[in-house]
């Protein structure tokens, strides 16, 4: 039978992990990389919208074309990446969570403006809030909201890339996206 070189203290800690916590202090709560990355994506999108409104003086409601969609998504991902690096968030699910947060924010920002107009007036302006609330309604599938316009832009680009599909295939694709 081999003799172990482990000390008595390390054997006790292996048997009872609570003993080690009591001796060395409580272990820090594990943070979910995926959850924090989703928040980084949402904050990246809000930051990009604020920057776009105040610096470029652009009032964007929805997405007009694929270039606008790509610019917003690219800018959002850069800001979210910078936030993740500042917070030292790394891991397998970080990029996925960041993209999911950005997409969720793009699809639901107009709903947030309807729910909390005073909060958005502090960051943007009363005229911006008035424009958003007058041109969209408080639904995810609002015709002028981020989800609906992004879907239309992507379907249009898909048609251009794949050639003329015909009405039936486009209707099936749109039905599958809803």
Image: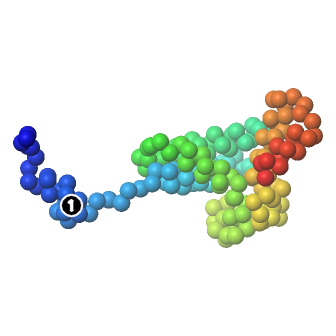
Q: Please rate how many residues cluster around mark 1, counting C-alpha atoms within 10 Å: few if below 14, some from 14 to 19, many from 20.
A: few
Snapshot colouring: rainbow
Point out residue 4 in the picture as x, y percentages from the top left corner.
9, 43
Q: Residue at the location (41% across, 56% down)?
A: 31
Q: How far from the left and from the top, in percent, is residue 40?
A: 53, 52
Q: Is residue 8 visible?
A: yes
Q: Is residue 18 above or below residue 3?
A: below
Q: Secondary structure at mark 1?
A: loop
Residue toward you, 1 or 43: 1
* Residue 37 x/y as whole percent: 51, 50
Which part of the image, by quadrant, shows the N terminus? top left
* Left-right relation of 29 to 169: left
- State the count of labels: 1
Q: Is residue 63 in view? A: no
Across and down, in percent, residue 109 comes to: 69, 58
Q: Residue visible at 55% across and 48% down?
A: 97
* Residue at x 8%, y 40% (from the top left corner): 2
Q: Which residue occupies the foreground of this view, 30 or 12? A: 12
Q: Residue furthest right?
A: 167
Residue at the front extreme of this rendering: 1
Residue ID for mark 1: 16
Which quadrant of the structure image shows residue 67?
A: top right
Image side of residue 67 versus residue 35, left or right:
right
Identify the residue shown where x is 83% and y is 46%.
Answer: 174
């Amino acid at each position: 039978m081999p003799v172990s070189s482990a000390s008595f203290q390390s054997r006790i800690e292996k048997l009872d992990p609570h003993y080690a916590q009591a001796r060395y202090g409580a272990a820090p709560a594990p943070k979910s990389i995926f959850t924090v990355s989703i928040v980084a994506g949402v904050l990246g999108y809000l930051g990009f919208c604020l920057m776009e409104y105040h610096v470029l003086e652009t009032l964007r409601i929805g997405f007009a074309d694929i270039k606008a969609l790509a610019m917003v998504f690219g800018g959002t991902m850069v800001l979210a990446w910078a936030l993740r690096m500042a917070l030292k968030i790394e891991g397998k699910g970080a990029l996925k969570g960041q993209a999911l947060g950005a997409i969720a924010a793009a699809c639901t920002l107009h709903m947030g403006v309807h729910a909390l107009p005073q909060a958005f007036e502090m960051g943007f302006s009363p005229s911006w809030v008035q424009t958003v609330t007058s041109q969209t309604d408080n639904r995810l599938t609002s015709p002028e909201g981020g989800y609906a316009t992004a879907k239309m832009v992507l379907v249009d680009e898909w048609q251009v890339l794949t050639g003329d599909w015909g009405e039936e295939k486009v209707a099936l694709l749109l039905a599958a996206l809803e």
